[in-house]
Image (cartoon, grey):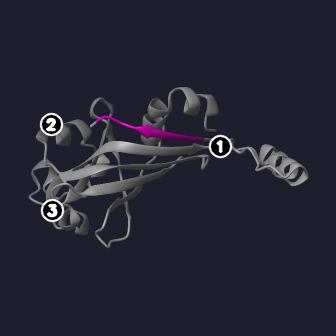
Amino acid sequence: MADLEKTRLDPLQQLWDEIGDIHAGMLGVEESGQHMQPMAPFVEKETNSIWFFTKTSTDLIAAVRAGSRAHFCVVGKDHDYHACLAGTISERLSREHVDRFWSAAVSAWYEGGKDDPELTLLQLKLDDVSIWASPKSALRFGWEVAKANLTGREPDLGVHTHLSLPH
């Protein structure tokens, strides 16, 4: 269940925790005309970045240009946490990050291992984040809907937070 107090008091740490608990989110390059696609995120908190393994021959790589922006959408494993992240995206084959994030799951995609000629990384440097967190209680949901219908006010079903991050 999303911790609404943490959403209010420490939303950035909560974001990193939520991303750490998922296997994939949806990544898309702005103005590329492409659909968003599922990608496995690897968090680098100290630079407000998310890294993605991909192949040099993918549509994503073809869409990335100097100064490109992208969105990454996250739905928490309990479906009570949603976030839309935006920032600049670039291709950056960093051996340090390959070594840092490499795993058995990643290696399954690269026949040549860490030296596969198709292997590359995308770095999404976040500068804008919007978070929605809600309690995962059917009883609370029902109560809020009933209360809203009686009072004419919108139901209170969670917290929305917006963050602007330094580059």
Residue 2: x %, y % from top left: 61, 38
Mark 2: few/some/many CA within 10 Å (<14, 14-19, 20+): few
Q: Quadrant of the N terminus?
A: top right
Mark 3: few/some/many CA within 10 Å (<14, 14-19, 20+): some
**Residue 27: which quarter of the image?**
bottom left
Which callout, 1 or 3, points to the residue nearer the camera?
Answer: 1
Residue denoted by label 1:
134
Residue 6: x %, y % from top left: 57, 29
Query: Looking at the picture, does residue 152 appear above or below residue 18?
Result: below
**SS for callout 2:** helix
Which of the labelled discs sits on residue 58, or is there none?
Answer: none
Residues in magenta? 160-166
**Residue 65: which quarter of the image?**
bottom left
Residue 50: x %, y % from top left: 31, 43
* Residue located at (23% from left, 57% from top): 68
Query: Looking at the picture, does residue 128 appear above or below residue 13?
Result: below
Is tag 1's residue or tag 2's residue first in the polypeptide sequence? 2
Residue denoted by label 3:
56
Q: Farthest front residue?
A: 152
* Residue located at (79% from left, 43% from top): 140
Q: Quadrant of the C terminus?
A: top left
Distance between mark 3 and mark 2 Cα atoms: 18 Å
Residue 22: x %, y % from top left: 46, 46
Q: Farthest top residue?
A: 9
Is tag 1's residue or tag 3's residue first in the polypeptide sequence? 3
Distance between mark 1 and mark 3 Cα atoms: 38 Å
Q: Amino acid at mark 1?
A: Ser
